[in-house]
Structure formats: structure tokens, C-alpha cells
Amino acid sequence: MLMTEERPKAIRTLRGWAISVLQEAGAIHECEEHGWAKDRADPHARERAVDLARRDPAPGVSPDDAVAEVREVLDSIGDTCPECQ
């Protein structure tokens, strides 16, 4: 029987990578109804995301640049869905 390994999704941009790190750390989540990213406002999750970015930056990106991108993306995401209002 042929077995295949499931590959992780290809992330095409640094912003996409940062969003996946923030989701993995639990710092952001999607609006259940519209799919917009929302900030969980959890300082521990934010720090986990920064630590993840520092320890395992995106390919070809320095740890400092990876952390900066995670923080920039997090600063651009609000805690409410723009369509729910």
C-alpha cells in the first residue's frame, strides 16, 4: 500500500508565515462567521508567537526580521471582525 505524507501548506509570503505563527501560538483566531483574523488579546500567546518566530524564522529570514514581521502583523489585526459590527 502506498503511503503519502501530508505536507504542510506552502506559505508564499512573509506575512502569511507570520499569520500562521500567530495562529499556532493562539494569539489570533478567525471570526467564525466571516473568517477575518481577530486578536485574542492574550499577552502570553503573543510572547509565544515572538518566541516561535525567534527560534524558527521563515526560510531566508533573520530571527530579528521574523520577530518584527510577527509584531507588525499582530499590530495590524484588531480584536473585532469588521463585518460583525
Image (cartoon, grey):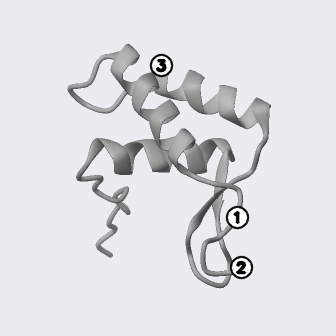
Judged left or right of residue 55, residue 85 is: right
Farthest residue to the front: give it: 85
Judged left or right of residue 84, residue 17 is: left
Instruction: Give the alpha-carbon distance from disc 3 to disc 1, as whole Å.
Output: 27 Å
- Quadrant for residue 36, please give it: bottom right
Label 2 environment density (alpha carbons within 10 Å; few <14, some 14–19, many ≥20):
few
- Under tag 1, what secondary structure? loop
Residue 17 percent location from the top left of the image = 38, 45
Residue 15 percent location from the top left of the image = 35, 46
Q: Earlier in the sequence, mark 3 or mark 1?
A: 3
Query: Which amino acid, by three-letter code, is at mark 3?
Result: Arg
Q: Which residue is mark 1?
A: 80
Q: Are marks 1 and 2 in contact (CB under 8 Å)?
A: yes
Q: Which residue is mark 2?
A: 85
Query: Which amino acid, by three-letter code, is at mark 2?
Result: Gln
Q: Which residue is mark 3?
A: 54
Can I make out residue 56 in this image?
no
Query: Which amino acid, by three-letter code, is at mark 1?
Result: Thr
**Which residue shows up at 56% across the image and 44% down it?**
22
Judged left or right of residue 19, residue 45 is: right
Quarter of the figure that contains the C terminus? bottom right
- Quadrant for residue 60, please give it: top left
Label 3 environment density (alpha carbons within 10 Å; few <14, some 14–19, many ≥20):
some
Q: Is residue 53 above or below residue 3?
A: above
